[in-house]
Amino acid sequence: MPRTLQSANGGEFSSAICKQTAKEAFLSVDGFQGDGIADTKHHGGPDRAVCIYPSEHYDLWQREFSCMLPTSTFGENLTVDGMLEKDICIGDMFTVGDAVIQVTQGRVPCSTISKRTGLPGLMKGMVNTGFTGYLCRVVKEGIVRSDSPITLLQQDPNHVSILYANEVYFQRPKDLEGLKRILEVEALAEEWRDMLTKRLEKLMKI
């Protein structure tokens, strides 16, 4: 739940980024029961009910910054193995425990990560590599356990990977074809759809 934390430079900020490990939790359309959000403007909502981060990236960041990162450094709800951004597509559906989730967008890193870790270069590194993790909506509610397998239920036919979408979103804002390709995905989060549509419309006028 949200609480006051000390930033690396000695300041204070309110956040729920410091997630605690749980053996099981109920996952509703609004997210995991007992999981709070401090900044409801930029986090949470039906399209962003679950945040996932690949465990493989922890080794990369720990080597790059010569440090040990805490559990759920990025405020993710699920730290997963074998589900990298290059292999996961917007619209893909997975069973996790008794629940079903659907990938909706890449995660947009925020300054809270820098405040928590004291590593200002980490957020920039996430953006540059596209190793941001991703967000999901809940299609079916249910209990999720720490040892619940995550199984691909349905792959989106558009095959727009999170890594591709991140590259267009962060690195190629004027990529007309890339924007169109992402917007063709029916499962795309509404916030990304609105933003990318405006970006596309502006480019079409030029």
Image (cartoon, grey):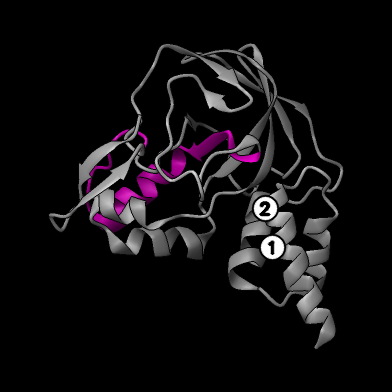
Residue at position x 43%, y 37% in the image: 37
Residue at position x 23%, y 55% in the image: 118
Q: Quadrant of residue 183?
A: bottom right
Relative to 116, 97 lies left or right: right
Q: Are marks 2 and 1 in contact (CB under 8 Å)?
A: yes
Residue 195 x/y as whole percent: 69, 63
Question: Depth check: 127 or 109 in front?
Answer: 109
Residue 159 vs 54, above or below: the answer is below
Which label number is shown at residue 191? 2
Picture quarter with the N terminus: top left
Farthest residue toward the bottom? 206
Which label number is shown at residue 195? 1
Residue at position x 31%, y 56% in the image: 114
Picture quarter with the C terminus: bottom right
Q: Amino acid at mark 2?
A: Glu
Residue at position x 59%, y 71% in the image: 171
Residue 57 x/y as whole percent: 43, 45
Residue 190 located within the stretch drawn in magenta? no
Relative to 153, 28 lies left or right: left
Q: CA distance from mark 2 to mark 1?
A: 6 Å
Residue 100 vs 7, above or below: the answer is above
Residue 95 vs 154, above or below: the answer is above
Q: Amino acid at mark 1?
A: Met
Describe the element under mark 1 as helix, strand or loop: helix
Give the magenta-colored segment's residue range.
47-72
Relative to 157, 129 lies left or right: left
Residue 61 located within the stretch drawn in magenta? yes
Residue 175 x/y as whole percent: 74, 74
Q: Dot 1, how many residues are within 10 Å of its Cα: few (below 14), some (14-19), or many (20+)?
A: few
Relative to 184, 18 lies left or right: left
